[in-house]
Amino acid sequence: MHLGSPVKRKKARIEIIPLIDVMFFLLAAFMMVSLTLQKLKTLRMDLPSSVAAKSDKKPDIVTVDINRGGDLKVEGKPVTLLELEDLVKKRFEANTNLPVYLKPDQATPYGRTITVLDTVKALGITKVSFNIDPPKEGAAK
């Protein structure tokens, strides 16, 4: 026969919260110690400073202006379609990566622009872009 005691027995419990605190403290302590174990051996040097060089060379770009009447200008000089072809051909032989920008006026006939475009493309130039000015404020669309 088992008789109960008037005094209740307490069961043992393992408290985990203080254990977590101790583990975080140990982790932080080991991290701090491992960082101080690394010794860097360096030499003191005076390195020269660098300065970016300014390029005097203008990039090789051909900009062709086409006005309302269909007249052509390259770098401000009026040229004919044949002169444009010769000029672009010479520059393309010197630089096979030559970009050509066509800058037609807003009122330029499309046919004239396409003629210039076809002439440039016939020479083998693949980098042809249109350089257009954005519409002015208040202009009708």
Image (cartoon, grey):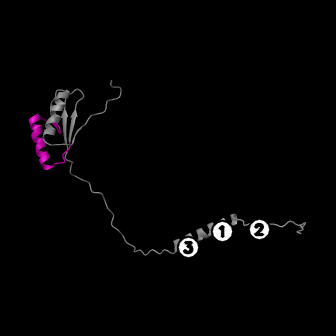
| Image x and y of residue 101, in percent | 21, 39
In which quadrant is the N terminus drawn?
Answer: bottom right
| Image x and y of residue 68, in percent | 19, 27
The mark found on residue 22 in the picture is 1
> Looking at the image, is 47 positioned above or below residue 112?
below
| Residue plotted at (17% across, 35% down) | 117
Tell me whether the residue at label 1 lies in contact with that at label 3, contact meaning CB atoms closer than 8 angstroms: no
User: Which quarter of the figure has residue 11?
Assistant: bottom right
Amino acid type at mark 3? Val
Pick out the residue farthest to the top: 140
| Image x and y of residue 65, in percent | 19, 35
| Image x and y of residue 87, in percent | 11, 41
Sequence-wise first label, 3 or 2: 2
What crowding class fits label 3: few (fewer than 14 Cα within 10 Å), some (14-19), or many (20 or more)?
few
The mark found on residue 33 in the picture is 3
> Looking at the image, is 138 positioned above or below residue 92?
above
Q: Label 2 to label 1, Cα distance in Å?
A: 20 Å
Sequence-wise first label, 2 or 1: 2
Secondary structure at badge 1 equals helix
Range of residues picked out in magenta: 73-99
| Residue plotted at (35% across, 26% down) | 138
What crowding class fits label 2: few (fewer than 14 Cα within 10 Å), some (14-19), or many (20 or more)?
few
| Residue plotted at (9% across, 36% down) | 82
